Image (cartoon, rainbow, N blue to C red):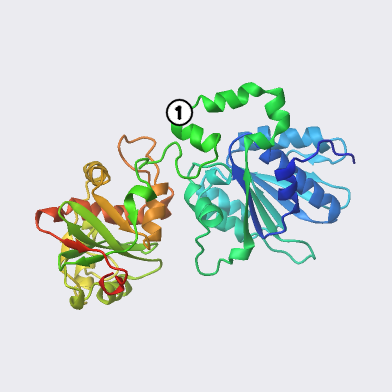
Amino acid sequence: MKLLGRPNEKQAEFFRSTARFTAYGGSRGGGKSWALRRKLILLCMRYPGIHCLIIRRTLSELRQNHVLPLLREIGRAVPYASGERVFRFKNGSRIDLGYLSCERDTLRYQGQEYDIIAIDEATQLTESQFSALKGCLRGVGNFPRRMYLTCNPGGVGHAWVKRLFIDRKFREGERPEDYRFIRASVWDNKILTENDPGYVEMLKSLPDKLRSAWLDGSWELFEGQFFPEFSREKHVIAPIQLLTRNRFAAFDYGFDRFALLLFAMDGDTLYVTREYCASGLTLSEAGEALERICGEQYGLRYAVASPDLWNRRQDTGFSGVEILSRFKIPPLVRADNRRIPGWRALREKLDGKLKIFSHCDELIRSMESLLCDKTVAEDASGEPHEVTHTPEALRYAVMSRPEAAFSVTVTHSTDAQMFL
């Protein structure tokens, strides 16, 4: 079988990558989808019997971006079973084609095994969908086991792709050597820029945020970002010493994620001094964490919590507040959890009145990645869910109006640990 086309320099770098997870992304028009298909074809030709999967978000995108191009590229030599959406090579290798338009679509892949999984436009998938596919990366043959991703900034998966491949902020169990990012640019694709110069001019004419993401490949600003005014340069600072007893906490509790933030005030400026985030905690375990981090020795005035903790729980008959009151924690205050007024108040703080200590990684990433709700004006989206918890806690804190009671004196120090 003769394959037409030669890779550009970045595509060739993508072909050579042997990392377990390789992401090829940046601006639009860099030839990423072609490289993804060609990589899988080459793997199928080299390793007889290898099992590959290509994923897109929707069936129509899958057909337009991969089924039809693959038919043109290899259709004469490799039979395609349209009912199964499978290309079967004579040497026993195969390329399956699938889609994940919603969370329940992952059920189709439970128990499936693939040697190679390719996700096109990975930022259109949630982190839970990505995790479900990672669970399918296994098998018994002597084949490489890898995932290849293409991506552009923006979308529901922006946060997890940026965390893993751009910021390289790894969690327990994630090995840095497994992840590699190859930056794509429209200027890499000489065929496109020479044959369709109008495409680049179109990208240049886009609104600022879209142009930044689609032409420049910037991961800092993107269309649909809920807090475009948030920036690390303006809102994130190195820890400083805060000589005050006027401190408080706010938290968002859920079994999937417990997000706790600690605060101090200087006039009308709110400082986020510490965060603690954990998953899978019962209320009692969350209470233990609160006592450890916010105990009496820290002198916190109060802790703001979501109103649902005042409701009785069917499993115990006790409210969440009753369970937490068994621990030595600050007085609990019922949060004003009105969403739109809360987000408006938080935007006011972003006008020079909010400072976040630089070690509050999850809050910083979440503020950058929170998306606009597609149907409710001025509200934040509930997806991706993993980036909603710390902004919720921050909103509770702002709505508790701490500036009415607090006044903080700030002095700089190189040794601020005892005050954090």
Name the residue rendered at 76%, 43% in the picture. 38
Q: Name the residue under label 1.
A: 207
Residue 180 % position (x, y): 63, 56
Quarter of the view holding residue 313: bottom left
> Which residue of the protein is positioned furthest toward the top in this rendering?
198
Q: In terms of image quadrants, where is residue 402? A: bottom left
Q: Is residue 308 left or right of residue 2?
A: left
| Residue 170 percent location from the top left of the image | 51, 63
Which one is in front, 110 or 408? 408
Q: Quadrant of the C terminus?
A: bottom left
Nearest to the observer: residue 268 or residue 262: 268
Question: Can residue 24 be seen at all in this image of the molecule?
Answer: yes
Looking at this view, is 11 or 278 the one in front?
11
**Residue 311 visible in the shown view:** no
Residue 20 falls left or right of residue 334: right
Q: Considering only vertical position in the picture, is 18 above or below 224?
A: below
Quarter of the image where one finds residue 258: bottom left
In the displayed structure, 253 sits above or below 210; it is below
Q: Which residue is drawn at 76% across and 37% down?
A: 70
Please count the marks in the image.
1
- Give left or right: position of 323 versus 239: left
Residue 319 location, x and y as percent? 21, 66
Q: Is mark 1 on a helix, strand or loop?
A: loop
416 vs 345: above or below: below
Q: Position of residue 360 (x, y in %)?
A: 36, 61
The N terminus lies in which quarter of the figure? top right
Left or right: residue 303 compared with residue 235: left
Q: Callout 1: 10 Å neighbours few (<14), some, many (20+)?
A: few
Q: Which amino acid does label 1 sit on?
A: Pro
Q: Report the front residue among 419 and 292.
A: 419
